[in-house]
Image: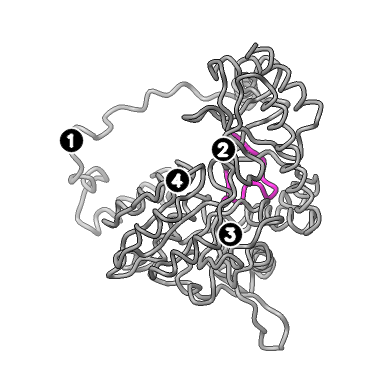
Amino acid sequence: MGHYIPATKEEQQELLAAIGVKDISELFTAVPEEVLLKEPLNLPAGKSELEVRRMMEEISSQNKVFGTVLRGASAYQHYIPSIVKYITAKEEFVTAYTPYQAELSQGILQSIFEYQTMICELTGMDASNASIYDGASAAAEAVAMCRERKRTVALVSATTHPDVLATIQTYCYGVGAEVRIVPEKDGVTDAEALRAALAEDVCCFYVQQPNFYGNIEDCTALGEIAHSGGAKYIMGCNPIALAVLKTPAACGADIAVGEGQPLGMPLAYGGPYLGFMAATNAMTRKLPGRIVGETKDADGNRAFVLTLQAREQHIRREKASSNVCSNQALCALTAAVYLSTMGPEGVKQAAVQSMSKAHYFAEQLAAIPGVTVKNQGNWFHEFVTTLPVDTEKVLAALAENDILGGLPVQDGILWCVTELVSKEKLDQAAAIIREVCA
């Protein structure tokens, strides 16, 4: 870092002399000798901008971008209006830093406030924070919100996305808390197993809606069972599905979380994404991260400020219930612009089209001899099928025709259809699968 410190060699020597050392290396005597870098790093010589551009273009050409995507599992390809990218690319948003100084940051504060408001409208909850890194982190943070001194065990439905479950387990392992899995039955959470799992040491129950297999859970009944045992109730939600399903608030949830990627963010090879969190008034003060509030300035004008943020997250981290002290402001802005552009009816149309096309595709696959659709109850836009042939053969055949097939899972393939997939492409995919299965 010496080259980046605005001090001359002479000034550096004066600084070293003032603290009683002769050389900068003496500041690192606590570092084991064997890990010290004795020679320059073995890096290639620098390249010109044109050379770097050519190299990066060659690397990027190896990426495969499918024309049709039939895979979801928490990352979904939805239609994104062009204005979303245009607005979020504006310099004042892209370069905005954390809005500590409210008087200088009214624009970014208002954008976060509008995002929070829309998340509350979408979930029916009372308050939202200024976002978390991703949906899995939001779920783990929600579990942390519920832990109490005598209640440290978290119950998680077996129908939860495996990556979300793993993240919850990682967070809980770090603080010595236990995660217990509530088994599934017929593709949804076993309600009686949940009832039996409740105990005095259980702090919360987490369920995903729709769940990993695409099935719609009876979240109202599950919430009632969780509350009957004194546990908090957390729902992980697909935000597009919320346009047609009961809100978490209507299901009795204490906290609603989810992956915000479907709200205007492209797949982007896995990120950056957005975790949204919203809670009831009773849980608001436990929300991690930032919350932007509306107030009035000295002249009575509408103004925005950071509010209700635990200082422990910054200055007493060992005592904090959460170490999240940042936010995904640009991704949150993207979600806000998307929701504003689409409006309630637009989001509902995206949900309805996704659901109807997925059910159409399921019908086409079910008509193929040997193919079985496992989802028997109500489901949204994802479903699982068993196949009479090796799944890799099916996926390879689809890939040859520029179609990314579903996600291989233990019982077959998890398919997903969004509003971007046309009927013609669904018919083509079904025909390819029929030929492979013949």
The image position of residue 35, as x and y in percent, is 23, 34
Secondary structure of residue under mark 4: strand
Q: Earlier in the sequence, mark 1 or mark 3?
A: 1
Kind of residue sitting beneath label 1: Glu
The image position of residue 179, as x and y in percent, is 33, 52
Residue receiving disc 2:
270
Secondary structure of residue under mark 2: helix
Q: Residue 411: give its label.
A: none
Q: Which of marks 2 and 1 is nearer the N terminus?
A: 1
Residue receiving disc 3:
97
Name the mark nearer the viewer: 2 or 1: 2
Q: Residue 33: give its label.
A: 1
Residue receiving disc 4:
184
Q: Residues within 10 Å of mark 2 (few under 14, many from 20)?
A: few
Q: Which of marks 2 and 3 is nearer the N terminus?
A: 3
Q: Earlier in the sequence, mark 4 or mark 2?
A: 4
Kind of residue sitting beneath label 2: Gly
